[in-house]
Structures are given as C-alpha cells and as structure tokens.
Image (cartoon, grey):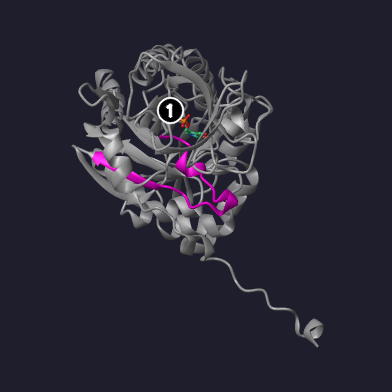
Amino acid sequence: MTTTVESTKNHLMIGGMDTVKLAEQFGTPLIAYDTQDIVRQVKAFQQTFANHRIDGIVSYASKAFCVKGIYQLLAPLGVHADVVSAGEMATAFAAGFPASRLSFHGNNKSVDELTMALDHHLGTIIVDNFVELHLLQRLLQERDETIAIQIRVTPGVSAHTHQYIQTGQVDSKFGFDIGSGQADQALTEALADDHLEVRGVHAHIGSQIFESTGFVMAAEKLIELLTHWHEAFGYSAQVLNIGGGFGIKYVEGDDPQSPEDQLDTVLTTIEARLGNHHLEMPEIWIEPGRSLVGPAGINLYRVGANKRVPGLLPYVAVDGGMGDNIRPALYQAAYEPVLANHVEDSSKETIHIVGKYCESGDILVNEATLPVTKTGDVIALLATGAYGYSMASNYNRNPRPAVIFIDHKHASVVVRRETNRDILALDEDFKKSAAEAR
Ligand SMILES: Cc1ncc(COP(=O)(O)O)c(C=O)c1O
C-alpha cells in the first residue's frame, strides 16, 4: 500500500512521508511516487516466474511513465523496457539503461527511429507490419548487420476494457493478422533473411484487465500459432511475449485479480498447453506498464476557488487538471480523491473536483465525497502513476508539474517543474515577409 494516514495529524502519507509537507516543499501540482511500491510489483512478477521455474522477462512499458528516473530505478532490478518512439529511446539512453534490454514497439516506426535503434544495437525490434519489416530488412542489408525481432500478431482476443485501449482484436491497427495468413507470411519472409534473428511472437490484448481469462485465451492462441509454425516451418520460438495490460484498483469497487496472480494463471496454462503440443518452454515476456507505476503514484493539488450554487453540487477548483492528467476528460477515468491535510472527518460533502483549464470537461473527479474543503487545502488523487505525466500537456500554456520519487523516506525531484521559460523555449519570433513589409 503506497499511501497511509498519519493518525495524530490526520495527514495522508506516501512512502512514509507527509504529503502536506511535500506539497509545501515542492509546490503543487505535484506528482509523487513511492519507489518501493514499484520495486515490490517488479519482484512479485519475478517471483511468480521463479515459482514456475520459467525464464521470465519483465519488460516495462515505458509509455506509462517515461522519465530518466524510472529507468534508473528499474535497471538494477534486471528489468527490460519497451519504447515506442525516438524520444522514449533517447530517455532510456540518457538514463544509462542498457540498449540490449530495450525493445522497440510501434505501428509506424520511421526510418530515423529504426536507424537510431540499429545505431544503438537495441535488444529487440517488435515488428508490427510488412512496411516496417521490409524497411528494416533494407536498413540491415545496407549496414550488413543483424538484429533480434519478435513478430507482433493480433490474436483475435479482446479484453474486457474500455474500447480505446483495446488492441488485441482482429480489427486493430497493431500487428500481423493470423487468420488471413499474414503472420505466416511475415515469419516466412523473416526466416529467409539472414539479417533477422526471429526470436518469437508477441501479442498485447488490451489494458486495465481485471482477470486472467483474456490472457489465457491469448496465450492459447499464441501456442496454437507456435505449434503451427513448428509443424509448417520447423520453427521453434525462443520467446513468447504476452504483452501488458494487468489491471489496477483505481476506486472503491474496483477489484482486480492481482497482476502476479493473473500471471500465475497464465503461466500454468502455458505450461499445460506447451506440454500437450510437445513444445519446449520458451522465455516468457510480459510488458506491464500501468501495474508497475500506476498504484505507486499520487497527484497533489492545492484547492483554490470554489463555486457554490444552491441546489447544485459545489465545484471545487484545484491548481492542476487536464494538463497533468487527461484521463478523466479523455475516457472518464475515475480516481479516488483524499483531502490530504484532513483525511478523516465526520462532516462530509459531495463536490465536483475540477481543474483550472479552460474546458468545461476539465473535471478531475465527478461527485467526490470528502470532508468540507477550503482554499489552501491539499487534495490528493490516488493511483495516478500511469499515463498521467506521460500524457501531460501545456494546454493553456500551463507548466507541467514536478515529479518526485520517495525512496526509503527520502524525497528527490526526478523531473523539475516547468517554467514559463521552458514553455517559450521553442517559440520563434514571427517576422513579416520582406515583400509585405515594403
Ligand atoms: C504493446 C504494449 N505493451 C504493453 C503495454 C502496457 O499496457 P499496461 O500499461 O496496461 O500494462 C501497452 C499499452 O498500451 C502496449 O501497447
């Protein structure tokens, strides 16, 4: 559990530190992570692999939260990471994360991005489509180099989750289709090319998945495919990558099976099915993003204005909003709010917690029941660590917040708060064309 309540002060604590003091020291809005919560979840995944005596790779999906600090936290744990852009790659390199432990994902990798990946000898390219496959082949031929790849397929399984974060169904922009023979074609072409070491197969079926059924179905499909590849092409995969998507608890009522329990069930299925098909156990890879960093993070905001109209719920405005967390506005994501400087109180009221951005939809929490708030209070939203800062924007030219890591009761800044100078850094003066000036 990342957060606790300090009983005498009635303050919310994260990683053993008082959130009210953190808000004072580092300013608000502030994003704070309990590093040990991230470490605990990594170890829980690794232990699950160990319990099954399976060589397992935990490959952190960087998109959930990509700053140098997270790579520096994860690297000593033996974790891999996947990146989806030159920017994520550059961040990992700047953090000193080993390139050999990086995988490059994406449905539209550019020439420059693939070249960057090859220049740095990335561990794996997860090939998504024929255009990319052919481009990669051309680049490798020109350089006379080899690289390890995994072939991403769409297993035709859709996890029970919000439609915008479903990626495993057949009608998806990601991966080679299995039923129409595209996956077979990709394998055939890749195997025929000496510049490609085809390590295995990859699928990702969605996100915020609460129980293992979808993973089990996907794993079964992948094993069917590997059996077919073995029989038809004599190909033995060294890697079976089942992607990420393990769900987390955001609000009361969310009751996900723990990520490690979901993994445990999938591994049991994989063991049984491979045995049935007389296939050797490959390395099993998972790509958790949300489940590693989501529960470990909180957002802290200071309360400013409020609007109270008789007969309507009050609007309580905080100093952040959709710029630091777009998820509620984007797909009605729900978060648990806490009045950090006065967690428990018998008198409570129901309010809308809104941001400061010029959009009526900038509502962080609809109908939150909290102790009565006043200007200057600190409100925390819990479990904001995934897809919050990584999707942050400068809408309304607001600076993005600072991010701190709490590590063994020591707080340090891993991303400093943006300033107006940062915001203006890319702007150039407009000069009228000479013709018009005349
Ligand atoms: C290919 C792939 N792997 C892993 C993930 C991480 O998913 P999650 O953060 O839900 O674990 C994603 C998320 O979209 C993804 O597209």
* x, y percent for residue 327: 54, 33
The foreground one among 137 and 408 is: 408
| Residue 145 image-quadrant placement | bottom left
Quadrant in the picture for the C terminus: bottom right
Residue 243 magenta: no
**330 sits left or right of 248 in the view:** right
Q: Residue at x 34, y 17 (%)?
A: 345
Horizontal and vertical percent position of residue 67: 39, 48
Q: Is residue 180 left or right of residue 68?
A: right
- Give the left or right position of residue 120, taking residue 310 as reference: left
Label 1: state its secondary structure.
loop
Q: Residue at x 58, y 21 (%)?
A: 313
Regarding residue 140, the answer to whether it shows in the image is: no
Residue at image mark 1: 373
Stretch in magenta: 385-406
Q: Is residue 149 above or below residue 6?
A: below
Disc 1, ligand 1: is the CB inside 8 Å? no
Q: Quadrant of residue 407?
A: top left
- Name above or below for residue 310 compared with residue 140: above
Check if residue 391 falls in the magenta segment. yes
The percent coordinates of residue 82 (x first, y second) are 43, 42
Would residue 23 be seen by someone viewing this image from the given angle? yes
Disc 1 residue type? Thr
Q: Residues within 10 Å of mark 1 (few under 14, many from 20)?
A: some
